[in-house]
Structure formats: C-alpha cells, structure tokens
Image (cartoon, helix red, strand yellow):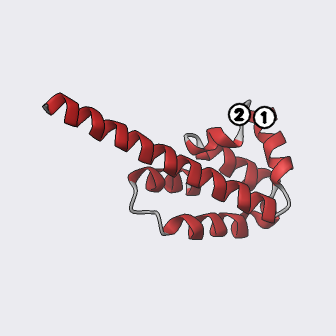
Amino acid sequence: MQDRQQFFKSTDQGRYDKVRENLVLIILEKTLVSAQIYHKVLSQLEKKYNCSLYDCYKHPECLSTILKDQHNNSYKSITRSINQQLDIFADAKSIITFLQAFNH
C-alpha cells in the first residue's frame, strides 16, 4: 500500500512539474511575440546553443544571454514582463529555480 501511495504521489508531482514547465513556455512565447522578437530569438537559440525555446525551461541562462547580447534595448522590459507574469507562481520551487537562473 505504501509503495502504491508513493507511486501516485510521484506521478502527481510529475504532472505538476509538466504544467509548470508549459506555463513558463507559454509566458516566454507570449512575451517574445509581444516584443516582436520571437522568431529572431528562436533562430539565435538554435544557432548559438543548438536548442529551442522549450529547452530554456531547464537552461534559462541560454535565453537570458541571447536577450542580453542581441536585444539589449528591450532586455529590461522583456525580463521584467517575464518576472511579473511568473511571480504569482513563485511559490513553486521549479519556478523559483527558473527565475533565479534567468535573472542571473
């Protein structure tokens, strides 16, 4: 019985992690589209890091570096927007970890 409960608990946690990951991805996409740099950023991520926006959840420093280096004029407003949208979910450890790495 204990093993079964642990299994369901870990399965539920995995689902929540996936929901948080998708939430971050949607916010990143929305923000980059609003700033009219979505396609440029995707291209730069692929060229420089051989990754996609989806990979930025686990490696937010890639996105942060691209924004700093290539979009310096809009960097502050973009990061502020992402931070504000994710702040209400910052009670989740995975979101906190993402934001810390993204803002570093």
Q: Is residue 24 above or below residue 76?
A: above
Q: What residue lies at 43% left-to-right and 48% top-to-bottom?
A: 16
Residue 102 location, x and y as percent? 58, 53
Residue nearest the viewer, comparing 50 with 85:
85
Residue 99 location, x and y as percent? 52, 56
Given the image, on which type of amino acid does mark 1 rest? Glu
Give the numbered dot on residue 46.
1
Residue nearest the viewer, comparing 59 with 73:
59
Examine the image and state in which quarter residue 9 appears: top left
Residue 65 location, x and y as percent? 69, 48
Residue 36 location, x and y as percent? 85, 61
Q: What residue lies at 40% left-to-right and 56% top-to-bottom?
A: 92
- Tell me if 29 is positioned left or right of 11 in this view: right
- Tell me if 11 is positioned left or right of 52 in this view: left
Q: What residue lies at 60% left-to-right and 46% top-to-bottom?
A: 60
Which quadrant of the rendered structure holds the C terminus? bottom right
Q: Is residue 79 above or below residue 9?
A: below
Residue extending farthest to the left is: 1
**Residue located beneath label 2 in the image:** 51
Q: Residues within 10 Å of mark 1 (few under 14, many from 20)?
A: few
Instruction: Determine the secondary structure under disc 1.
Output: helix
Find the distance from the CA under tag 2 to the CA under tag 1.
5 Å
Give the numbered dot on residue 22.
none
